Image (cartoon, rainbow, N blue to C red):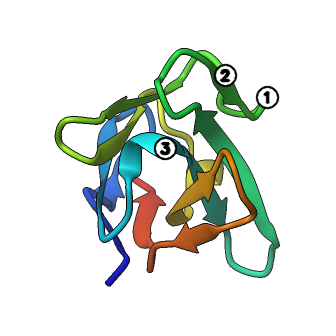
Amino acid sequence: QVQLVESGGGLVQPGGSLRLFCAASGFRFSNYAMSWHRQAPGKGRELVAVITSAGGTTNYADSVKGRFTISRDNAKNTVYLQMNSLKPEDTAVYYCRAASETSYIGYWGQGTQVTVSS
């Protein structure tokens, strides 16, 4: 059974940091590109960051460049999102996604809430 389980969300003050985790199981993690997406209330889901299967290439939305870092540990089947200098506009539900690099197969996690507020 495929599972993507996000954790690490919560309430943080502006300027603070959080680290999100996405634990994967049920598929060959090392064959999948991984990404983080977010959806704020009343808005569509947007791509935040993506990392290739071996971790050699990363890309970020302009809004988070220089503040967020995506990384992965293929031995632990886990992808991370380090979020620094958080802003109120970063408030959203953050989702983890796995996308096969050899087919159209993809999986979504259930999301974790991040709230940036004083």
Q: Residue at x 61, y 18 (%)?
A: 57
Viewer-nearest residue: 97 or 82: 97
Q: Residue at x 38, y 50 (%)?
A: 29
How many numbered markers are drawn?
Answer: 3
Residue occupied by mark 3: 31
Residue occupied by mark 1: 62
Q: CA distance from mark 1 to mark 3?
A: 26 Å
Contact between labelled residues 3 and 1, with CB atoms less than 8 Å apart:
no
- Residue 110 picture location, percent across and down: 44, 80
Q: CA distance from mark 3 to mark 2?
A: 25 Å
Q: Earlier in the sequence, mark 3 or mark 2?
A: 3
Secondary structure of residue under mark 2: loop
**Where the N terminus falls, by quadrant?**
bottom left
Viewer-nearest residue: 99 or 35: 99
Viewer-nearest residue: 61 or 22: 22
Residue occupied by mark 2: 65
Q: Residue at x 58, y 47 (%)?
A: 35
Label 3: few (<14), some (14–19) or many (≥20) C-alpha neighbours in 10 Å? some
Q: Earlier in the sequence, mark 1 or mark 3?
A: 3
Mark 1 against mark 3, which lies toward the viewer? 3
Contact between labelled residues 2 and 1, with CB atoms less than 8 Å apart:
yes
